[in-house]
Image (tube, rainbow, N blue to C red):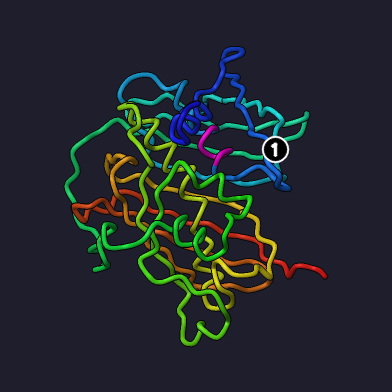
Amino acid sequence: MGTPVDDLVDLLDLEQIELNIFRGRSPEEALQRTFGGQVAGQALVAAGRTVEGERPVHSLHAYFLRPGVPGVPIVYQVDRIRDGRTFTTRRVLAIQGGRSIFSLTADFHRPEEGSIEHQYPMPSVPAPEDLPSALDEVGSRLGELPPFISRRQPFDIRYVERLRWSKEELVDVEARSGVWLRTNGPLPDDPLIHVCALTYASDMTLLDAVRAPVEPLWGTRHFDMASLDHAMWFHRPFRTDDWLLYQQESPIAHGARGLARGQIFDRNGQLVVSVVQEGLFRPLKG
């Protein structure tokens, strides 16, 4: 039996079935839809497998078109849009059961020296060693873990603020959330694996910032949530098996949609990734 991290690496290891065509596994789950972070991570693997030379991914822009079905394989078709002197562009279409469920455009950039250097400072928050694991905290509170927790098991996630369990605790809560995260074990040294693993993880907590002022993150959920689109910019190299601080905020929620922005810092305070996502929020019926 492999570890959850081994399972994650295996999930991101696509089968090439033809030139520019790959097939990914979709785990059986007792949930309505395939996890969006899985599809995004696999699509980025497919794109990266067609890029030659030292050209790390520097950005991705993606749309979730239809819900994926757990347990059904997903085919990824890669279109080689551009192979320039310094930039490479790939477009990926994810297909399941003959229907497009996800599209992604990724850009890869040959490393070069820059003439402008600045960044936002990393906020001051408790160190991950001083915070409880979210899975341990939720498990001790609920007695059993919700079904979607299987998606989080490859990662150690620790919320920088205490978890709230009732609406009475939501007085003056801002539309923001922060977590430390890393994989629950070492990853291979391939930089693409670290980027794709973080792409997987980036979809797990970002929309928490939208929900934070209106309902407890781990209490009874009153909204059906779905990711609509997802964008990431990779600024510096990083390792996803080292601690990363994921600071998340929501500037607006309106018209059944909520926007969330994230900044990801390494332990040295370097801003390594920026993330933006919009999600759909509809009240649960019944």
Residue 272 image point, x, y percent: 30, 49
Which residue is farthest right?
286
Residue 123 image point, x, y percent: 26, 67
Q: Residue at x 61, y 60 (%)?
A: 279
The crowd level at tag 1 (other Cα within 10 Å; few <14, some 14-19, many 20+) is some
Q: Residue at x 43, y 67 (%)?
A: 177
- Which span is picked out in magenta? 38-42
Residue 163 part of the magenta-drawn span: no
Q: Along the line of sight, which residue is nearer the eye, 115 or 233?
A: 233
Q: Which residue is mark 1?
A: 70
Quarter of the figure with residue 96 = top right
* Majority SS type along the magenta span: helix
Residue 86 image point, x, y percent: 32, 29
Describe the element under mark 1 as helix, strand or loop. Answer: loop
Examine the rendered structure and indicate whether residue 20 appears above or below residue 166.
Answer: above
- Left or right placement of residue 77 versus residue 174 in this view: right
Examine the rendered structure and indicate whether residue 87 appears above or below residue 202.
Answer: above
How many labels sit on residues?
A: 1
- Left or right placement of residue 243 versus residue 57 in this view: left
Q: Along the line of sight, which residue is nearer the eye, 87 or 187?
A: 187
Q: Residue at x 29, y 54 (%)?
A: 265
Q: Along the line of sight, which residue is nearer the eye, 95 or 178?
A: 178
Q: Along the line of sight, which residue is nearer the eye, 108 or 49?
A: 49
Residue 40 part of the magenta-drawn span: yes
Q: Residue at x 35, y 37 (%)?
A: 185
Q: Amino acid at mark 1?
A: Pro
Quarter of the figure with residue 77 = top right
- The quadrant of the rendering that contains the C terminus is bottom right
Examine the rendered structure and indicate whether residue 162 appears above or below residue 58.
Answer: below
- Left or right placement of residue 208 versus residue 94 in this view: left
